[in-house]
Amino acid sequence: MAYINKIFNQNFLEYASYVIKDRAIPHLDDGLKPVQRRILQSLFDMDDGKFNKVANIVGHTMQYHPHGDASIYEALVNLANKDIFIDKQGNFGNTLTGDPPSAARYIECRLLPMAKDVIYGPEITEYTDSYDGRRKEPITLPAKIPLPLILGAEGIAVGMATRMLPHNFIEVLEAEKAQLRGEPFSLQPDFPSGGIIDASNYDEGNGKVLSRARLDASDPKRIVVRELPYGISTESLIASIENAARTNKIKIGAITDFTTDTVEIEIKLPRGVHTKDV
């Protein structure tokens, strides 16, 4: 019994603390999870103004991150697709359709100049030993702007989880200036996929936000989805519509996805049904 108590009182608590601090939950100072911070540090290390193969960046990041190349690759693609700190070249997938990116050996990226201005400052960065003691890695990066609000984050740890919604870059900067001046401000989430939101119950981040697709019903015989709800891809939205049609909740004639860089899902209505009736 004493052995069991030790497992729960010591080993499990150490594991839980590790997952919370070193895997799943972003740090409030720079809004980054450890794998994201290590990717950016590797990009700083490798930066010469030229594009680097993602495979090389992943390999370099493994000097800091002990959890394998697959998790680094996925985190790098997700971070690059936020289009804030990383300049990408090649097929990084499509966040609107859910199409996957190309293999790491085919795509390239590099730091954007803003990353060096906003989050890089080795003179004021506190470092610690990497997992094997061979290198130094930053505890946090000295971000000049509130990245947790801009990037947003999701993470599930042990007994703890987080979900911070992304916000508009310019609106966050304006709110930051207002805060420094002691002026009142209002800040609400802003999603890269667009959509219509109801933030009446947002409660400064402690409540909830309802997100809906934006529809174009100007044609009486078809409906076009122009923007998506947050966290929904065109593939999952189409599957949901088709499922509703199969269960006779809605009537549609055909549905076609024309999405590329912008969302365009065309829903043709059957004979005798018009957009005003749907």
Image (tube, grey):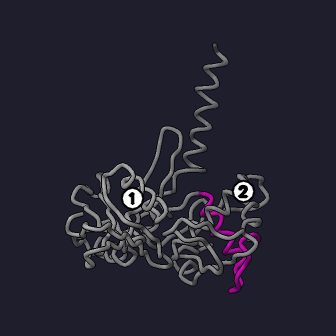
Q: Residue at x 20, y 69 (%)?
A: 276
Q: Residue at x 40, y 63 (%)?
A: 230
Q: Residue at x 71, y 84 (%)?
A: 48
Amino acid type of the residue tagged 2 in the rendering? Ser
The residue to which callout 1 is attached is 241
Q: Position of residue 225 (x, y in %)?
A: 36, 71
Name the magenta segment's main secondary structure: helix
Q: Nearer the viewer, residue 212 or 183?
A: 212
Q: Position of residue 95 (x, y in %)?
A: 52, 68
Q: Is residue 178 magenta?
A: no
Q: Which stretch appears magenta? A: 34-56
- Residue 151 higher or lower than 85, as above or below: above
Q: Nearer the viewer, residue 175 or 265?
A: 265
The secondary element bearing badge 2 is classed as: loop
Q: Residue at x 60, y 50 (%)?
A: 22
Q: Nearer the viewer, residue 77 or 22?
A: 77
Sequence order check: which comes first, mark 2 or mark 1? Answer: 2
What's the mark number on residue 130?
2
Q: Position of residue 84 (x, y in %)?
A: 51, 76
Residue 180 visible at all: no
Badge nearest the viewer, 2 or 1 = 1
Q: Nearer the viewer, residue 246 or 140?
A: 246
